[in-house]
Image (tube, grey):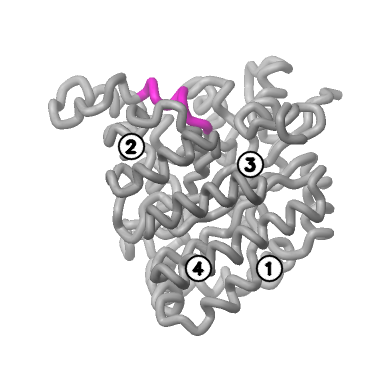
Amino acid sequence: MSPTRTYDLHAHCLVPSVQALVAEQDGFRAEQALQARQMGAASMEHTQGLFPTWMQRLTDLDTRLALMDEMGVDVEVVSVSPTQYHYWAELDLAEEIVRLANDGVAELVARMPARLQGLGTVALQHPQLATRQLEAAVEEQGLRGAVISSAINGVDLSDAAFDPFWAAAERLGGVVFIHPFGCSLDERIDRWYLANIVGQPAETAVALSHLIFGGVLDRFPSLKVLAAHGGGYLPLYAGRSDHGYAVRPESHTCARLPSEYLRRMWFDSVVHSPDVLRRLVDAVGVSQVVLGTDYPFDMGVDDPLALLDAVSALTSDERDAIAGTNAARLLGLDEATGSVGG
């Protein structure tokens, strides 16, 4: 058996104090109404039936550790469920939401530091505040970066207003995990759970394209970006981006071919199919793929190592890289122990 520790970089928690804080806020009610409209009645009903199980898995440490053991995960990198971004919040409330959320993640990690690492969250609707929150999360709380959505209240990640946040993330060496919440396709995907099945990968592909074509990765070349759900549709269709870059002057905005930037980002393995995972590895390079489960949700992967082991033509070293060593390198952790500074 390989001595490599297995890392899950896509695993969620939920902080109950954040739920209590926002429960009576008009912004939260409006967000819930929008989510219900975008998902559709059938998906909302089914999700509500799953919620008690999810809630236990999101909040109970013993349940989390037992399921990690079942999946063969040694270290889980925990981030809040995207339902706790709350980008609608005004400045003071946003500051309190993030304080509670990041305290909750840090406290969870502190209960089992040998098995858990954490990512914070930030109020990116207030970029200067988000910058300070990221600094506090990394420098004071020991979190490894932050999770953000694919757009912030309709503003795309290429917007110059977010440059102070990107600059701080680059300076701190923090990982920015891009995980969508909601989809701009709106009611076009309000049935058959397309809001998640199609919406999540579409949103991720658009967000990454903004980072590339919008010059964010040129302005911040050392930025550590991790994309959920294998980067969505972009890595498997990057040839179209390169073609547009070549033939359309308005697309010739980044310093290199768009596909070259894929080898400067990281991508989780939550793509469900060994063949798709093989193509992802070919598109971005084995060094840029890390394990993920999307714990504890039903669109996740319950046996991530079986998925990895089913990928054709992986050497043992490549398999170990995806299972753990890439993640340790990305997070700045010791590969053998999971401790900081290896």
Observer-side mark, 1 or 3, equals 3
Q: Are marks 2 and 1 in contact (CB under 8 Å)?
A: no
Residue 167 x %, y %: 41, 38
Name the mark on residue 43.
4
Question: Is residue 86 depicted above or below 215 in this figure?
Answer: below
Which residue is labeled 1 in the image?
A: 55
Observer-side mark, 1 or 4, equals 1
Label 4 or label 3, whichever comes before in sequence order: 3
Screen quadrant of the N terminus: top right
**Which of 184/327 is in front?**
327
For the point 47% across and 72% down, the residue is 93
Residue 237 x %, y %: 37, 30
Label 2 or label 1, whichever comes before in sequence order: 1
Which residue is labeled 3 in the image?
A: 9
Residue 268 x %, y %: 57, 37
Q: Is residue 303 left or right of residue 266?
A: right
**Which of 209/103 is in front?**
103
